[in-house]
Amino acid sequence: MNECIFCQIVQGDAKSWKVYEDDATYAFLDVNPFSEYHTLVIPKTHYADVFELPEAQLMEVMRTVKAVVSLYETKLGLRNVNIYNSSGADAQQDVFHVHFHVVPRSAGDGQDLSRTTHPEFRERFDEMLAQLASTT
């Protein structure tokens, strides 16, 4: 995976600003931050997205997300954060090595996430659940 920038970071072939590291994961400051201390958490092994990521590795990544959040709470007093993952091009994933964003937030930071709700989907909830329950 020499072309993957996150793999290069894990291997020490590309510069990063390490926040936390253990045997399975690596957390570092995002070079295009949305806020101070915007951090990316990745597994050291390459998986393109959350669909490829085995459950055991997901649990390791989530433990590191919690370690980073706890570090920021203890050292910086941060108590507001967005945690998210984008998997797939249509979900706005731009680096195809699975990663989770830890984005500290504060009032007036200009990073409000805009979402459009679709209450009309409620009419299809039974149909949607039936589709999930089907064996085909």
Image (spheres, grey):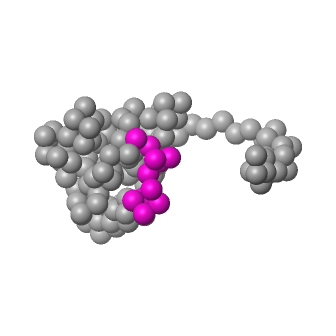
Queried whether the magenta region covers residue 52, the answer comes back as yes
Estimate the x, y position of residue 52 in percent, counting from the top left.
46, 47
Compared to residue 64, the image places residue 121 above or below, namely above
Q: Is residue 62 visible?
A: no
Q: In the image, 53: left or right of 16? A: right
Q: In the image, 117: left or right of 27? A: right
Residue at image position (38%, 45%) is 47
Foreground of the two, 120 or 63? 63
Estimate the x, y position of residue 13 in percent, counting from the top left.
13, 40
Estimate the x, y position of residue 104 in percent, counting from the top left.
38, 52
Magenta stretch bounds: 48-58
Foreground of the two, 19 or 73? 19
Foreground of the two, 17 or 73? 17
Residue at image position (29%, 65%) is 71
Q: Is residue 10 visible?
A: yes
Q: Quick one: which residue is furthest to the front in this view?
A: 136
Queried whether the magenta region covers residue 41, the answer comes back as no
Q: In the image, 47: left or right of 86? A: left
Residue at image position (38%, 36%) is 96
Compared to residue 22, the image places residue 8 above or below, namely above
Compared to residue 70, the image places residue 111 above or below, namely above
Q: Where, by quadrant of the figure, is residue 76 drawn?
A: bottom left
Please identify the quadrant where the N terminus is shown: top left
Q: Where, by quadrant of the figure, is residue 79 drawn?
A: bottom left
Estimate the x, y position of residue 82 in percent, counting from the top left.
45, 51
- Prevalent SS, magenta region: loop
